[in-house]
Amino acid sequence: MPTIIVFCHLRWDFVFQRPQHLLTRLAKHYKIVMVEEPIHHDGVNFLKKTEVAPNVIVCQPYTNIPVWGFHDDQIPSLKPLLAGLVADGDDPIVWFYTPMALPLLQDLHPSLVVYDCMDELAAFKNSPKQLLQRETALLGIADIVFTGGPSLYEAKRERHANAHCFSSSVDAAHFRKSLDRAIAHESHANIPHPRLGFYGVIDERFDIDLLAALADARPDYHIVLVGPVVKIDPASLPQRHNIHYLGQQSYDALPAFLAAWDVCLLPFALNDSTKFISPTKVLEYMAAELPIVSTPITDVKVPYGHVVAIAHTHEEFINACDAAVAMMPEQKARMVDRMRTVVAGTSWDVTVERMRALIDAAPRVAKGTRPQVLPPTSPQQSARGAVIDSLNNQRALEPVKCVIVGAGPTGLSAAYHLGSDTLLLERNSTVGGWCRSIKDNGFTFDYAGHIMFSNDAYVLKLYDVLLGSNVHWQNREAWVYSKNVFTRYPFQGALYGLPPKVITECIVGAMEARFGDLKAVPGQPGPAVDDKCDIKGVDDCCADGTVDLANSSASAPAEPKNFEEFIYKVWGKGIARHFAIPYNKKIWTVPLSEMETSWLGGRVPLPDLEEIIEGALEPVGKPMGPNARFGYPLKGGFQALMNGFVPHIRGKIELNASVVEILPKEHLIALADGRRFRYDDLISTMPLPELIKMIGDAAPEEVRKAAAGLKHISIRNVNIGIDRPNATDKHWVYYPEDTIFHRIFVQGNASPECNAPGGFGFTCEISYSPWKPLPVDGDELIKRAIADCIKVGMIKPDDNILAANLTDMPYAYVVYDHQRARNVATVKSWLEQYDITLAGRYSEWEYYNSDHAFLAGKKAAEKIRAADDARSMMKS
């Protein structure tokens, strides 16, 4: 029987949760050896072994090292204690719940490494400073990554090619015991109804203020809290006559507590430590068929918002508790039906079998061929903080004038314009960032649709330098598919062919947006119009439909308060209803009222009524605008444009180079492979929230909060190649209605060289976010995209699928919410004092397309050269 050695930060006898559920079931197929964190004592080091369940051995190391956890100082003592865990000739599976134990991996000679990421441990209170660095290294070594919920999955999936989401499940039979309310726990004998209960760890994730507010607002409600208090002062918990702290209880006893309650609570605070949590107890509460009230934790709200009452404020939470207590029988019956459906769809047994299938299918790594693990720092260094001291170790430092993080279009441009004394770091195996391309069965696909167009003469010359003759220029064929017909892009200027009622609504709405209600009393003045207002033009990012919607020559008197209001003021109710609102909701995923409008030019343009009416009466000819004619590499996909930079870059390019930590004050940067660099200047093109994560606690709290407050949407691409050439003459199509994708980019028409012989390729772009997660993923997402392509006529039912794959862009579009400008300014102003320059879409948190990215890199290079010249003058 194979062995699984598990390193866990949780004690087996602490709270029975995910590790215990999984490992006891895996023990039917593997010998489980779980290693807990060391326990301090003053004697000789030893290892205590206890069989806690059939085929499950828990090992507790006792050491005389006075530090907690898998601390670097513990590693030399732990290695000899664990040496006997692996028999000669045995190549075990090593399973991590905490990356901090990674230095213990090397001596175990694993055939397979599994990382079951059940929490974002780095966000927890008192987490080790080097945890993020250790996790990055583990992600580089692990063969399989499991995550404990969809939020964690979205955070990790781009960082590992074999990541899988396994949300916490439920032992339904165990918790259905609570349906016999007669087994109510004896501790409740003197606690009146209604009883509102919570069980679990009470720590920094628990909303203490909410608990007090509920107890004070409803003195007749009795709140029962079951679980240990850790990492917070018990004295900080509110003390009220109607709050009952019953302490930690056994897993076996939990159904009896549920049997005693009327309502179940999930009163989690909204902070960094709860951003990625996926509470196991929500399904256990459902198995007990009790009403549930929760704060808006993403992994509760998104999958279970139709069953669980979600409350955003204290007042909403109290009101939701009132509704739960007063729930009528027919309401409860409907709730129970929904709960039973959810619970029936999951179980720990099914989860384990799916994990086993992935483990069995994973290729094993031969002994001695796995990459070396970065060793921990010495005890002397770790006394002040392992990561900081290892970075400050002068013998390990390599000096460089300028480090550029990220070899996307901005980073490549910066390196191209800077010169020789630069180091360009890219975590992927090729340059290009989200402008990379992939090949599949003779097809070339990009990471979403990209094209070449620009009004900047310098960029146009740069295209020639990078591609030479390897370019294909053509007229744009952009279309909208709605009401079962194709109309030219932009929608409002090409209404011809739509149902007459739709055309009427669009024209009338556009007129009313300009002149007021057409049914108003004659003689009443309409809105004033200033035809002399200066309108700032808007460039279209990745051809997503904003440029022709926003560029005009007149403006309304009052600026809109948000994007939704902008849409109605610009185009009126008809165009808003039939295209602008549904399409933008689909792509942005957030309420449009939460977005501001600076990215559209700052003024409210009015529609050109003549163009709208003409476009409704007859077909529109070839379009005009900044991307009416565009270029695309003839061969090699958009990757070819990125590759064109490489021969011209005089500095050094490092691929597969993952940055794990940055110390701004010390001008130091560390990579996952252990290398460290001291720089004069740093250009960051990585997403701004990720940059601040790399800096960690060295950034002030207000900076960390500002970065965490930045919103973005992600794109999952379904790339499809069929066996029918010339499937369409279009370059891209917008879909505002009920397809899973919002746009199809037709790779096969961007360049015929992107197609396999006799085939035709295109990309379905699907936006998602914490506010609108993907309804399905993996093979099911591909099947759904193919089905929708058949529905809209892009694929015929008898077409053979020659290629079908997924690519993911976790950071795709930045969201211009009302807090964006303030948050970006807070982060940027702090970074600038440490010679860190932000450049590009994701670092500047701006709405850039690729030509803007080229210019952003050039501008960053010029800034660095100017700073370098200033330093030289000061020295002289």
Image (cartoon, grey):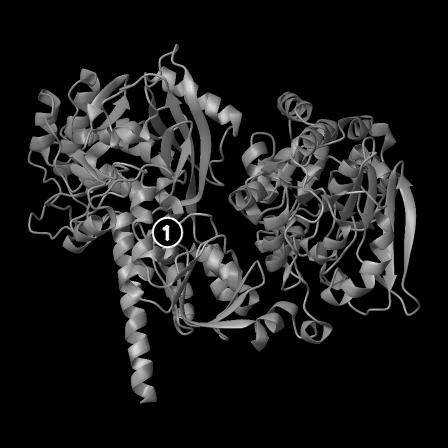
Residue in the picture at 10% in, 45% down: 553
Q: Residues within 10 Å of mark 1 (few under 14, many from 20)?
A: many
Q: Which residue is mark 1?
A: 408
Question: As rendered, which of 501 and 766 lies closer to the eye?
Answer: 766
Query: Quick check: 761 left or right of 3?
Result: left
Residue in the picture at 33% in, 63% down: 650
Residue 282 at what x, y percent from top left? 67, 36
Q: Residue furthest bottom?
A: 876
Which image quadrant: the C terminus?
bottom left
Residue 865 at what x, y percent from top left? 29, 72
How many numbered tags mark residues here? Answer: 1
Which image quadrant: the N terminus?
top right
In the picture, residue 265 is in which quadrant? top right
Residue 504 at what x, y percent from top left? 17, 22
Answer whether residue 226 is visible to the viewer in this image. no
Question: As rendered, which of 311 and 656 lies closer to the eye?
Answer: 656
Q: Amino acid at mark 1?
A: Gly
Query: Quick check: 90 left or right of 412?
Result: right
Answer whether residue 374 is visible to the viewer in this image. yes
Query: Quick check: 772 left or right of 268?
Result: left
Question: As rendered, which of 113 and 652 lies closer to the eye?
Answer: 652
Query: Quick check: 43 left or right of 852?
Result: right
Residue 98 at what x, y percent from top left? 70, 52
> What is the secondary structure assignment of the residue under circle 1?
loop
